[in-house]
Amino acid sequence: MTEAFEISGVPSEGGVLIVVDHASNHVPEDIDLGISPQFADDHIAFDPGTAPIARLMSGNAGYLAILSTVSRLVVDLNRYPDEPSVIQQRSDGVEIPGNHLSAEERKARIERYFTPYHDRVRVLVSDLKPSLVLSLHSFSPTLRSDLQLQRPWDVGIMYNEYETASRFAIQYLEEDGVLKVGDQAPYSGKMLNATMNRNCEALGQPYFGVEIRQDLIMEESGQRRFADILLRTCDKIRTALA
């Protein structure tokens, strides 16, 4: 583990690489976000359930995971480094006063966490040449900032210009008949896909993005269930792409 990321599993060429941008809610001791401790376990801080799923999956041969080790409130890794939202000043109705930074402070934080994380993702893709990359996220069923918004999907599939692996994912998940599957829901990958755009789509690397509803994976049983579902789905996609 480094300060910016954790690697789980054994590297192998041609396998599946799992990328988890929002795996951790950790805030380093020298960073004061200025928010109530109640938000430490909130969805604005990280994607609950994703880290255990990634670690379970990476226990299988041919699967490797890279997980973030700091909260998305410290730096949002699924953004571009020059976007204002890479360091959020407000998230789902919560003000983040500690993120009102000078240009120098902003640059230092990006260099401390964002740059090494993305550098390692890029190296893993380049060196291992995975048959498939899985971008793993989770989403909140509700939002404080929009109480009327309904997010009923069990799992959503995200993509931008490259659709092939995602189309297979939607097909295989729907064939199981037990999940409500969102196609570009709860949001569109054409709007928010920065990590995969930079490290996969720009390189012609097959990938797909997954969003799992958080209330389904808060407990170990749900995490194991979705790890198994995603392992089966990834293996089917790899076969289809071969």
Image: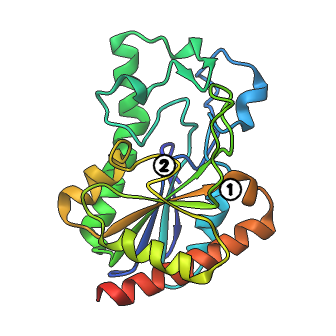
List the residue tagged with mark 1.
49
Residue 161 is situated, as x and y percent measured from the top left of the image, at 24, 57
Residue 115 sits in quarter: top left
Circles 1 and 2 in contact, beta carbons < 8 Å: no
Residue 21 — which label?
2
Q: Which residue is more in the foreground, 43 or 57?
A: 43
**Mark 1 belongs to which amino acid?**
Gly
The residue at the point 62 percent across, 20 percent down is 93
The residue at the point 79 percent across, 65 percent down is 220
Q: Which residue is more in the foreground, 201 or 11?
A: 201
The residue at the point 36 percent across, 48 percent down is 193
Q: Is residue 62 visible?
A: no
Whole-number angstrom distance, CA of label 1 to CA of label 2: 13 Å
**Mark 2 belongs to which amino acid?**
Asp
User: In the visual, does 99 lie left or right of 80?
Assistant: right
As helix, strand or loop, the secondary structure at mark 2 comes to loop
Q: Which residue is more in the foreground, 139 or 183?
A: 183
Q: In this rendering, is residue 238 above or below 1?
A: below
Q: In this rendering, is residue 103 above or below 26?
A: above
User: In the visual, does 37 lie left or right of 138?
Assistant: right
Colour pattern of the rendering: rainbow
Q: The C terminus lies in which quarter of the figure?
A: bottom left
Residue 8 sits in quarter: bottom right
Q: Is residue 116 visible?
A: yes
Residue 164 sits in quarter: bottom left
